[in-house]
Structure formats: structure tokens, C-alpha cells
Amino acid sequence: MKLKAMLIAGALSFVPMTAMAADLTIGFSQIGSESGWRAAETTVTKQEAEKRGIDLKFADAQQKQENQIKAIRSFIAQGVDAILLAPVVATGWDEVLEEAKDAEIPVVLLDRTVDAPDDLYMTAVTSDLVHEGSVAGQWLVDETAGEKCDIVELQGTTGSSPAIDRKKGFEQAISGHDNLNIVRSQTGDFTRSQGKVVMESFLKAVGGENICALYAHNDDMAVGAIQAIKEAGLKPGEDIKIVSIDSVPDIHLAMANGEANATIELTPNMAGPALDALEAYLADGTMPPKWIQTESKLYTLKDDNMAIYEMKKDLGY
């Protein structure tokens, strides 16, 4: 297998890391392009590979696990040196990851985790998804300051680790605060279009005047919801507080316009730490930790959101 041979060659001849990277072929199974953040992650991953001289084999799964499994098997058949996987859901990976392990191809998870034995992948590069949800919940606790607030929640893709963990963290943060109650919760599948559709259903079922806040598991659903709120004759950010996760350019533009209130950043550069880990492994066999955590940051209306929008708008979102 190419990776094993390169590791031995690197140990014997001390080939520089950049030279080894230039000889690498890596497969990247991406979920799809369901959100602006996902598109940015794809762009940044391709940029990181190009910068390092890596031949990146890219496969867009269009939000379907079966497509990702097919792509991984194709990568294995091609004899790639490593596989980057952003898993669409958490379960159902054991068999194909076992096949990659048998082929001695290390797998690095990007931005999401899987429910599988941890010997089936090298490392996972993710944010602390539970922490992200907790930051969102704590912001709302502080913002409402004990006043009654009925919340509607736009969940991410059912069964995905961000949806599970961001919900868990938010609920943990508001637990014990009797003024805060989630009155409606439904998946918007991480997309703007479904965020708008589901928010419309919330407004009809509950009544906009009875909704204090929206918590969305990602910014794209929040942007769709903002449109639904405006079409209902309400003022997003004022009549209904909005907190979401990702820190994509359009949510900062909405915040600059007073139409959203807070977002928690999820960096799109998961590939940088992942490729660093692979290069270190190739250089001397160093195994990375099982979890490489990326930084998250809370942005509110106190920040210069127009400047942040300008900074991020050309990053591929």
C-alpha cells in the first residue's frame, strides 16, 4: 500500500515533509453542499490540498450515506494514501471503515463524528458540538434575564452528530431556567429552503406573537427562517430573537442589519489540522490524538458584523 511504503521510505531517507505531501493522493468524501458553511469547507479543503501539492480526489455525496460508502470503496480500490470523511450521519460506518483499515488506509473524520470503534479511524477533527449548543443556550439565558421566553428550534439533519450534540448542549444550558421553554422543534435538514418552510409552519402553529426566540442548529436554516419571519410581517432580531451556529457571511450581514442576534463560529478549515496530522504520521509515524478540537467563538450585535461579513464573503461560502 502506498502509505505504508512512504512511511518506511520517509523513516529511512528523511524525505522532507513537503516532498512527501506532494506525492500523496487523498480521497475526500464530502456530505454535499447543503449549506454555505459546507461549501466553504469544501473550498478550503481543496485549497489546503493544492497548497501542499496533494492530489485530492473529491466526491460529493449529495447528502446520501450510500453515496459516501460507494465513494470510500472507490477510494480504497484506487489505493489512495488516506481518506477524509465528513459523515452525513453518525451510524452505519463500521463495515466500510473496516475495509479501509484492512487496506491500511487511514481515515480522518472532518467536522462530524461516527458511532464506530475508534480503531477504525485515525482521528476526528471537529469542534465541540455540545459546547456550541451550550454557548447558544447560555447566550439566550443571559439575553432574556429571567423573562418568559418560548423558543422554537430548527434542528439539523436527523441522526447527524451536529443535530444531536447541538440540541443536547442547548438543552443543558437552558435546563433549570423555567422561563425558557422549547415549544416546537423540527428538522430543517441544515438548508435555507427547509429552514424557511419549517419556520412558516412554526409561525402558523404557534403564532409569531407567541415566539420569543429561534434557535437554529446552523446559520443557513436561520437565514431561511428570517425570510419567513419577514414575510409574516414581523421583525427578525426584534420580535423574535435569533441565535444560530456556523458564523457564515450571510448571518453576519443579517446581524449588521439587526435581523439576527448571535452566532457561534464553526471554522471551515478542518482540513488544515487533518493534513498536518497525516503529514506528521508520514514523517515519523506519530499518531495524533483521537480528537483534534477546533476553536469556536461567539459573535453578537456588539461585534463589527459588516467587517466580519466582508472578511468572510470570498472564502467560498
Image: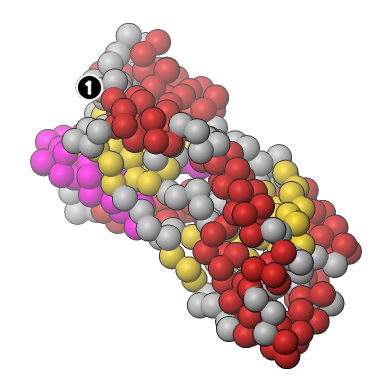
The foreground one among 199 and 58 is 58
Q: Is residue 212 magenta?
A: no
Q: Is residue 83 left or right of residue 312?
A: right
Q: Is residue 152 magenta?
A: yes
| Mark 1, secondary structure of its residue | loop
Q: Quadrant of residue 232?
A: top left
Q: Is residue 309 above or below residue 232?
A: below
Q: Is residue 224 left or right of residue 182?
A: right
Percent position of residue 14, x then y: 67, 85
Residue at 75% x, 48% y: name it. Answer: 59
What segment is highlighted magenta in the picture?
131-157
Q: Is residue 167 visible?
A: no
Report the quarter where the N terminus lies: bottom right
Residue sticking out furthest to the bottom:
12
Q: Is residue 76 above or below residue 173?
A: below
Looking at the rendered structure, the number of numbered marks drawn on it comes to 1
Q: Is residue 185 left or right of residue 289?
A: left
Residue at 19% x, 54% y: name it. Answer: 176
Percent position of residue 148, x then y: 16, 35
Q: Is residue 74 visible?
A: yes
Residue sticking out furthest to the right:
77
The foreground one among 288 and 170 is 288
Q: Quadrant of residue 8?
A: bottom right
Percent position of residue 157, x then y: 56, 43
Residue at 37% x, 58% y: name it. Answer: 295
The foreground one among 36 and 314 is 314
Dot 1 alpha-carbon crowd within 10 angstroms: few under 14, some 14 to 19, many 20 or more: some
Residue kind at label 1, given as amino acid type = Glu
Residue at 70% x, 72% y: name it. Answer: 20
Q: Which residue is mark 1?
A: 238
